[in-house]
Every structure is written in C-alpha cells, then in structure tokens.
Image: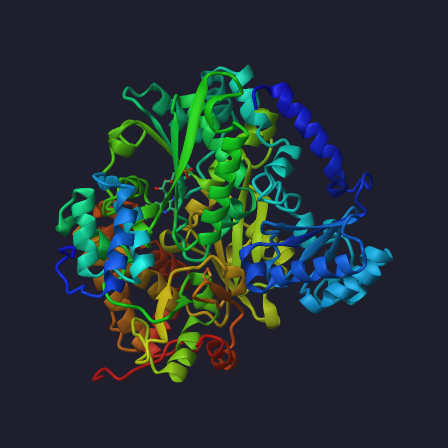
Amino acid sequence: MKSLAQLEQLKKEMREVLKIRDGVASGPWNYHVMVCGGAGCISSNCRDIVTALKAELAAKGLEKEVKVVLTGCMGPCDMGPVMIVYPEGTFYRRVKPKDAATIVEEHLANGTPVRRLLYRAPGSTEPIPKYSDIDFFKKQHKVVLRNMLYIDPLLIEDYISRDGYGALGKALTQMKPEEVIATVKAAGLRGRGGAGFPSGMKWEFTAKATGSPKYVVCNADEGDPGAFMDRSVLEGDPHSIIEGMTICGYAIGAERGYVYIRAEYPLAIERLEAAIARAREFGFLGQDIFGTGFNFDIEIRIGAGAFVCGEETALLTSIEGRRGEPRPRPPFPANAGLFGKPTVINNVETWANIAPIILNGSEWFASIGTEKSKGTKVFALAGRVNNTGLVEVPMGTTVREIVFDIGGGIPRKKAFKAVQTGGPSGGCIPAEHLDVPVDYDSLGQLGAIMGSGGMIVMDEDTCMVDIAKFFLDFVVDESCGKCSPCRIGTKRALETLERIANGNGKEGDIELLLELCSTIKQTALCGLGQTAPNPVLSTIRYFRHEYEDHIKEHKCQASVCEFKAAEE
Amino acid sequence: MVACGCKCETTEQAQLIEQLDRIIDEYRGQPRGLIQVLHKAQELVGYCPKWVQVRVAEGLGVSLQEVYGVVTFYALFSLIPKGRHKISVCAGTACYVKGTKMVVKAIRQHLGIKPGQTTEDSRFSLETVRCIGACGLAPAMIIGKDVHGRLEPEQIPEILEQYQ
Ligand SMILES: Cc1cc2nc3c(=O)[nH]c(=O)nc-3n(C[C@H](O)[C@H](O)[C@H](O)COP(=O)(O)O)c2cc1C
Ligand code: FES
C-alpha cells in the first residue's frame, strides 16, 4: 500500500462486494451466513456447522450464491452456536450441524427463515427474527467490537472494507505525530487494562522521553480469571490492534512493537500471527508505510502462565526472557521500559479504540460516555446470569441495565446478590447499588473497580465468604514472593478466611482481617499485593452479616461452606 | 554422542537433542529468547527435565540457575512428565461460581487422581487453571486442545472416554 488513494480504492471495491452485510442485497451474493467463531461457539462445535452448511450448499449448487463466513465472537455465548444471515440480519441460536440441511433448504434456497431456530425473549413464545431487534444487541454500543458481526478475522480485505487502516493512512499522511497525541488526549481515552490512566498522556510522556529506540507494547495477558474481552478482540479483529499500535509507533517515534499474549490463548496467537503476516504483505507493517518513510513492525511474545505478568513492569521483564517479577515505579515505562528504553504499554481494548478515535475525531469519542469516563467499555458477563457473553456499553450505563436488560437477569428465578468487577483486584456491587453508573470513579467509590472488564454475577446460592476465599487463594497462588506483605500477609489472611469458612472462626477474626488487609494495601510492592485485599474488604463491607453467621452461628446461608470440627 | 548429563544412548534421544538444538539455534547467544525457547522445548520433550535446561542454558548463554528460576516461576513449565491427555479444569471466577468443585470431584471419582497428578497408565494428567476464556460456557475444561463447556458431572465419564 503506497498511498491513501490506493487504500480508498480497495475499500470502495470491497465495500461494494460486502454491502450485503449492511443489509443491501446486491451483487453476486444472495446471502452471507456469518457463523460465530468465538471461543464459546467453537467449543460447541460451530466449525462442524460451517462444514455442514458448505456441503449442503454444494449439493444444491448454491456455493456461488451463498457465502459462509466464520467470524469472531458475536457476544451471546450462552445462546451459542449462533449465526446471522445477511442481508436481512436473521439471527439463529443453538444451531446444530444437523440443522444445516433445513437452513439451506428453507431459508437459503427458498427465502423462509427457520422458525424454530429463531430467538425468543425469556417467557415469550413470539420469535424475534432480526438480531438488531433483540434486547441483547439493541442496548449495546459498539466501538471496540465494531467489526465482530461483519468480518472474517482472517481476511484483511474485510477489515479494509470497514475503514480498516484508514486511520493509519490518515495519521501518517495528514497528521503530525503531535497532532495524533493531541487527538488521543482530547478524546479522553483512559486505559482499559484496569487502572484507567489517560492514554494520551502516557503517549506524550514517552514521546518526550529521551532514549532510543522506543517501544510500543500491547498487554494481552488478560489475567483476570473470569474475563475474555481481550481474547475476543484478538481473535475476532486482530488488525484493529495492529493498526492502533502502528499509529502509536508513529506518534511516539518507535519502530518496533511487541504483543505479549498469554499462552492459554492459542487461537488468538494464531490469528494475530496470520494478521501480522498479511499486514506486512499489504505494507501496513514493515518499511516505508504509505510511502511516508515510516517503518514499524510487530512481534509476538508468549507468556507462560503467571498472573503477575499482567502488571506492566513484570510483563516487560518477561518479554526480556526473565522471571516476571515486578519492580517499584518510578521510573515508569514511559521513561525506562522495555530493555530500559521509553515504552508505551497499553491494554488490548485500549489499542482497539485508537483507530476509530483518529478516524472520527476526539469530539465524537468524547461525546460517548460520562464526563470523566469517555467512550465505551467491553464486559465479559458471566456467572449466574441468563445471557452470558461479551457486551459493550457506553460508560455510565448502570449495572442494572447490563445485568437485567442486556444480560436477561438471573436464571431459575433466583435472587440477585452481587456482581463482582475487577477480579482479584476488585470488589463487589450489592443489590442496593444496582443503579450505579459504570464508570471509573463511581465504581471506585463503592470499593469495586472498573477493572479490565470481567463482570461476574452472583445469586443467592453464592457465599461471599467463599468468594473472598477464592480470590485470596488465587492471589496466594500467584504472588511472586518478592515482597513479604504480599507473600506472607495474604497467606495469613487466607488462613483466617479458611478458618471462618470451616466454622472455626473466632470472635475478632473480622477485625483481624481488616487490620491485615490495610497493612498489605499500604506496604506491598506492586499492584498485585496492593489490591489483593480488595475482594475481602469489599465483601466485609457489604456482607459482614455472612461473615458473622459463619463465625457465630456456624451457618452458611448459601450452603456452600462445609463446616469441620476444630480437631480435624 | 553429545554430552548432556543424562544417559541418552538411544537414537531416539539423540534425535530429540538434535531437534532441541535447532530450536535453540533461533536464539543462540540471546538470553531474551529464554521463555520462547522453553515453550518450544517443552512442546518437543513434553516437559522441562534437567538435561533440557542444561542445554538451553548453554545455548542461550545464561546460567542454569537462571533457567531453573524461570522454569519454576511460570506455571506452564513442568519439571515432571505429563499424561498423554492433559485435563485442565477451569478454576476461574465464572467457572468457580458455576461449579468447578463439582467437575473436579467427578473427574476424581472417575480417574482416581487429584489436581497435580497423573494416572498410573499415563493416560491423563489433571490440573486446575485460571480462566480459559470460555467463561460464557462455565463450568468449562480443556482436554488437549478441545474446550468442553456447560459441564454436568454426569457427562464426565462419557467425555473422558473419547480420549484413549
Ligand atoms: C497484578 C496486576 C495484574 C494486571 N494484569 C493486567 C492484565 O492482565 N491486562 C492488562 O491489560 N493490564 C493488567 N494490569 C495493568 C497493567 O499494569 C497496566 O496498567 C496496563 O497494561 C496499562 O494499559 P492501559 O493503560 O491501556 O490500561 C495489571 C496490573 C496489576 C497490578
Ligand atoms: S472462568 Fe472459566 S473460562 Fe473463564
């Protein structure tokens, strides 16, 4: 790709071919069948459905009229395997390979949707044929997940048809590096990896830092156990990450980027590798990008199963091939990052926001969300909720809207108890705060945090002491051991919690926990230890009575904890 | 015969060493390649025994101590051999809330092994892991490369039967 004009031309051609996916039936195709290829649907055998559909189409001689595409995660994992048929946008759920014959016969050959595979709202028998009329989709606002329902992640042409690499072209040929940084700053984008630091400022610090070369790093370690947003973006729209990182490279004056992905995500690694290779072939990576003399390339580094490596200083050490132990900051990576050089490190979702911001401008982005939290947030909705899956909402949406409107509420008429956000560093939001708007500051005030986007719904059958124990057990396991407050403190806290959960808790144990937690918070070396007490503090804050029940009455309301005699 | 500190007399083992050396060649003399090399070495050998660590250390120019430090720091590297089929039961938050304990119990009843153990016939090894990214299908587990979701204890024997 040597010029923006050339890209525009390709985009126009591809757009024409693919406009059926915007609901405009024309061109050579009668239908495009988009089968969800997210992790959830793949594990419920969506690949067999693709094979079956293709075989049925071939048998009827329809291969030239109907195209079958495997996409990234469409979101409604619980309804999987799901698919959307364009141009009309018919949504099918819980599809089985044996349904392929019927879909081809009735719908793709004769134009009548298969009624029994259509979605029905809980408690209703009336089918809702179009995905865009279903609450789960209707109430979302997609920026990061913009391409999920529309592209084949393995085809760079599909990405280009939806403005892909247009932002890179614009930045490189029409904007100065400072203007790019100013745009990201003005947009008000804050880091999506958990801490919410303004991304534009981070870029500016790194651009101004002395030292070269500079590096761009993508944090794709996704350590929160109960979250799969980053994975879905990498698998479903890998080019959006490449484009975001390359724009940053131009803005800060870096020529090399690294993506650090956890080894547990082989498909994400495979897709990103393929996307990087394609981007090189098209000249979006490599030498003299868009004929501007700017060079940039990206390499993948694979993690090896250590939660602490999601912490930025540990991650950078791990890329260098060493034990991923964190170090105190400052110096921040902006000044002394990878190999001791100035480095921008951002989260996957942060990177996916960059191209739309450059393309549509900072005002557009800043118009979404709340005063201090701009844009949207992707959540991995899971646990005891009907529509588990991937959702993206404007900042400021309430927890109630996410859990009940989009999530469809709690299964089996159970009572809602809390949602947990922020994983092992976060806290819970109880029923009385269901109407809290989801933004960095409001969640912080409740003692929960935005976190990276894991949102676990809990109902009356969940015991909050057990949940606190679960997270602390996780931290004890994952503590790197470098500092003693984290290594020993969390272990002591876990022992106390175990005692309480066993029915051997003593009067004063809650106070002991509170004191221990506050010491760990103040003295731990890195974010892992400093935030480790949060799940305990938060459950004590809102569910102290459950702790007391365990200690005084030896009672676990949710019947989760098994009480043992002290002698055991 | 290459000196690797173990009794690798058979040609099979000699071949393994040759393949390992090819992996090492990509990063020869570059300590920063340690983790990536260990990944590939473990894929080749099945785990990271001492002779692998020694060879990697010499090849990349780092101390054996450093290699051992890295192997033991990261959960994915193993010092002991694993079964033919590795079962990883997800113990992430979503799965935990929906019944990790019950899945582990069912496997334990069927195979007689606890997390961290391998069956006597080396058919299965069992471990719990933190979130495999299939939270929407909780509770979930991975066997080899296959994800199994929405698990009920009754299904466990049938699923395990597929792996011989
Ligand atoms: C213990 C710990 C674990 C973390 N894990 C992750 C992670 O898995 N993914 C991530 O993007 N950020 C994680 N972070 C945050 C990173 O340190 C860092 O703030 C982030 O990569 C910056 O990117 P952002 O500004 O785009 O959010 C973690 C932080 C701590 C303290
Ligand atoms: S918590 Fe089990 S897959 Fe995420």
Q: Please indicate whether residue A380 sits to the left or right of residue B118 in the image.
A: right
Please tell me whether residue B162 is drawn above or below residue A176 in the rendered image: below
Q: Position of residue A100 (x, y in %)?
A: 73, 63
Q: Is residue B61 visible?
A: yes
Please tell me whether residue A386 is drawn above or below residue A289 in the rendered image: below
Quarter of the image where ligand 1 sits:
top left
Q: Foreground residue, A21 or A331?
A: A21
Q: Foreground residue, A454 or B153?
A: B153
Q: Please indicate whether residue B128 sits to the left or right of residue A365 in the image.
A: left
Which residue is at 23% across, 59% downward?
A: B14
Q: Position of residue A180 (x, y in %)?
A: 49, 21
Asked which quadrant contains residue B101, the reply is bottom left
Q: Position of residue A147 (x, y in %)?
A: 62, 41
Q: Please indicate whether residue A533 sits to the left or right of residue A12 in the image.
A: left
Q: Foreground residue, A83 or A8?
A: A8
Q: Is residue B76 visible?
A: no
Q: Quadrant of the C terminus of chain A?
A: bottom left
Q: Quadrant of the N terminus of chain A?
A: top right
Which residue is at 57% across, 63% downward?
A: A385
